[in-house]
Image (cartoon, coloured by chain):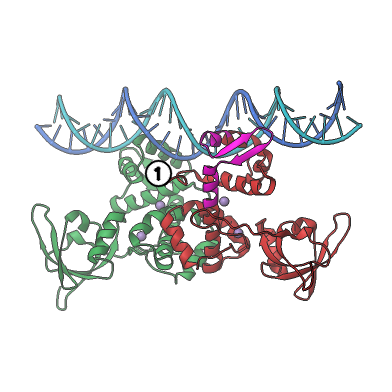
Chain colours: A green, B red, C blue, D cyan
Amino acid sequence: MLTTKDVSPTLEEYLEAIYKLERKNGAAKTSELAKMLNVALGTITNTIESMEKQNLIKHKPYKGVNLTRKGRRIAIDVIRRHRLSERLLTDILKIDWSKAHNIACKLEHAISDRDIIRRLDEVLGKPKTCPHGNPIPSEDGEILEEELEVLVDLNPGERGVITRIVYEDPELLEYLASIGLVPGVNIQVKEKAPFDGPITLKAMNRSYALGRNIASFILVKKRHVRGGR
Amino acid sequence: MLTTKDVSPTLEEYLEAIYKLERKNGAAKTSELAKMLNVALGTITNTIESMEKQNLIKHKPYKGVNLTRKGRRIAIDVIRRHRLSERLLTDILKIDWSKAHNIACKLEHAISDRDIIRRLDEVLGKPKTCPHGNPIPSEDGEILEEELEVLVDLNPGERGVITRIVYEDPELLEYLASIGLVPGVNIQVKEKAPFDGPITLKAMNRSYALGRNIASFILVKKRHVRGGR
DNA sequence: ACTTTAAATACGATTATTCGTAGTTTTTAA
DNA sequence: TTAAAAACTACGAATAATCGTATTTAAAGT
Ligand SMILES: [Mn+2]
Ligand SMILES: [Mn+2]
Ligand SMILES: [Mn+2]
Ligand SMILES: [Mn+2]
């Protein structure tokens, strides 16, 4: 067997962050990493250098870093552990979904043992997504990234189902839960105010106005109306 | 509120170990700590020094270390988290009791959040002991250490119930489970061979011969026979 | 009391992770 | 094309945790 072995919790966090930024922007800039990981820029430079030596990433100065095959394999493994941990917290321990993410971020490093992950997966009923709708990679590293639209990009009139919350910030999650905008809910965009103004949408017979910022963290599966193109 | 805050996982492990050695021998010698924590002696000296500065322990050179009130409070908290983690692993995830201890030793540092511990406690049905029979401290730091006898100290003829396995080594636990000597089982000592020879005992209509070493890790609750003194 | 042994400490050194400031390089905007 | 802004790197330094090899000190045995 190969890979997955012996990366410190810190490096696991780095890999996780790089994976996400790479998905979104094609590469992870050091400044973005610094923000996401809450450390000083110099720290990123240092760690990045050591990670490159370990063949976990490839760094092109001023362009950002990308995962190597080895780095990606570990990153996906961490994400699997993270999302299964979140399920454990919400489904079994009944912890609020807004708190689950941060706790899982610590748990994920404690449950590296293959057997536990498998048992966890089974006990939870082999869930496909985390409580926030994000996909759980399979044991052998497959991750199904569905084709989804960012809510903020939908035009007035278009319908969809809320599917993923990609920014798992406690306050945002708490807010969304409080107003009922959670995965599974059908919505229709009514209006987009100009000058980066709010998006108005309808869901569950109610009307909602969301800032574009928030709407950019929500992914929806578009629903094509009967007879629509 | 006081205490419990912000000790590194490493120090939590130290405190846990010191608590156990203190229970057993009145104080924790640096050499015992080195063995128990699997680090070099010099490392212990260093860490001990820093822990004393943080008011977690009191060190009398050549006599050993003892916990301060603050140190004890944290140690007990760690033990609570450890034992609840073990229950989670065995009761919910159906992990073997021989593997639970080592995994819990990592988990315990990841679930420091008060809420989770409380939820865990509730979901598990507020268990009184870990899967190996050792008591789980209460939320406010009470720990009920029952009066028990070490199996190796029982004399031929005496009866008891296996109650705690205090040395939670995977191989020992696997062995005990394989022969069925687990907490709750009634036993009677039949014979103690001289020259530190094995102890013979009867349980579940079978006969067992245990080395004194093993028998010293098993605590039993003595059962007084009808009419016995 | 003297010697041997065991326990503990001192010391020098390494690795991982982090910080902050100062200096470069690239990008952007004029 | 040049100046300003933003992004990045270099460097010096700190802390926690660890090691291994002396050296010192206490305890035990003769
Ligand atoms: Mn994480
Ligand atoms: Mn999630
Ligand atoms: Mn532990
Ligand atoms: Mn236990």
Image quadrant occupied by the C terminus of chain B: bottom right
Q: Nearer the viewer, residue B10 or A39?
A: B10
For disc 1, the marked residue is A58
| Label 1 Cα crowd, 10 Å radius (few <14 / some 14-19 / many 20+) | some
Up-down relation of residue B184 to residue B61 (above or below): below
Image x and y of residue B205, in percent: 78, 76
Q: Amino acid at mark 1?
A: Lys
Q: Which residues are magenta?
A: B49-77
Say whether residue B83 is left or right of residue A172: right
| Residue B62 lies in quadrant | top right
- Which residue occupies 41% across, 69% down? A127
* Residue located farthest toward the bottom when viewing the structure as drawn: A226
| Residue A151 lies in quadrant | bottom left
Up-down relation of residue A21 to residue B198 (above or below): above
The answer to whether residue B159 is magenta is no
| Residue B154 lies in quadrant | bottom right
Image x and y of residue A102, in percent: 38, 54
- Which residue occupies 65% across, 36% down? B41
Say whether residue A54 is left or right of residue B215: left
